[in-house]
Image: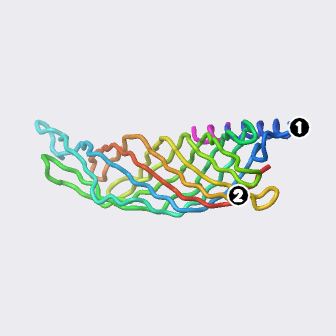
Amino acid sequence: MKKIKISLLVTTITGFAATGALAQSKANAWEGAYGQVGVGYGNFAPSISNGTATIPTGRSAPYPATISGTTSATNVNNINTGLVTIAAGYNFGINENYVLGIGATYYPGASSSATGTLNTLYNGNVVGSTNATYNIKNLYNIFLSPGYVIDKDRLAYLKIGYTGSTIGLSSPILTYNTTNLSGINLGLGYKQMINAQWYAFGEANYASYGSQTASATTTKGTSVSNSIKGTGMDLLVGIGYRF
């Protein structure tokens, strides 16, 4: 679904760019298509709720085959990581002072890893525990970007849109599994022309991801399920090309 959304957006942006090329004049210097790359720093802070566990007893009838327990996550560290981004978009000129942009950003590769402890409990007592490692990958956002044209060389802008990512989790007793998160993305930024086409930019982004259920099975057959959500932020600098 992510690839389809981004492919449709790129196709749309290409169409807008072609239309813009046929236009005789622009409302302002920042109207038109652009592409950019950036580097920076990112942070992700997860929130993991207590969940459920189905624990096999290893006993046969008339004894129960499984019993119900709970799960918890403790000592969960935030992810702090370096980032690389690729973005493309199109700014529609509203008048000489304002643009409204549409665009997409993709963060290739995976983040650095962070650790936490997953616990299985029965009647309030810990009956199993494992150290786990997780990271973030497949991060992207699709956004609208209203901007204020300071002059032909400077642009200030806001961003609001949809964001998605994948959490990958592994531990010595859990099979590797992934959970897709989605939410809203907010940002603000500034662009400064270097020459006729190339510009430098700085940007700050914040993301809030809604709750999703993450499920896994241990090597001993215990099924565990937890709700996970989180927030992310990044600070980026980079260069772009204004068509």
What's the residue type where badge 2 is placed?
Answer: Gln
Q: Residue at x 43, y 60 (%)?
A: 79
Q: Nearer the viewer, residue 10 or 25?
A: 25
109 sits to left or right of 221 = right
> Which range is magenta?
1-8
Q: Quadrant of residue 77?
A: bottom left
216 sits to left or right of 161 = left
What's the residue type where badge 1 is placed?
Answer: Gln
The residue at which mark 2 appears reads as 192
Report the quarter where the N terminus lies.
Answer: top right
Label 1 crowding class (10 Å Cα cut-off): few <14, some 14-19, many 20+?
few
Q: Nearer the viewer, residue 139 or 97?
A: 97
Above or below: residue 85 compared with residue 123: below
Are discs 1 and 2 less than 8 Å apart at CB? no
Tell me, yes or no, whether the highlighted magenta stretch contains residue 160.
no
Q: Quadrant of residue 238?
A: bottom right
Q: Residue at x 24, y 42 (%)?
A: 54
Q: Position of residue 190 (x, y in %)?
A: 64, 54
The residue at which mark 1 appears reads as 24
Above or below: residue 218 compared with residue 25: below
Secondary structure mainly formed by the magenta segment: helix
177 sits to left or right of 223 = right
Q: Residue at x 60, y 50 (%)?
A: 106
Q: Nearer the viewer, residue 177 or 154?
A: 154
Tell me, yes or no, whether the highlighted magenta stretch contains residue 7.
yes
Q: Residue furthest left?
A: 62
Q: Position of residue 135 (x, y in %)?
A: 45, 57
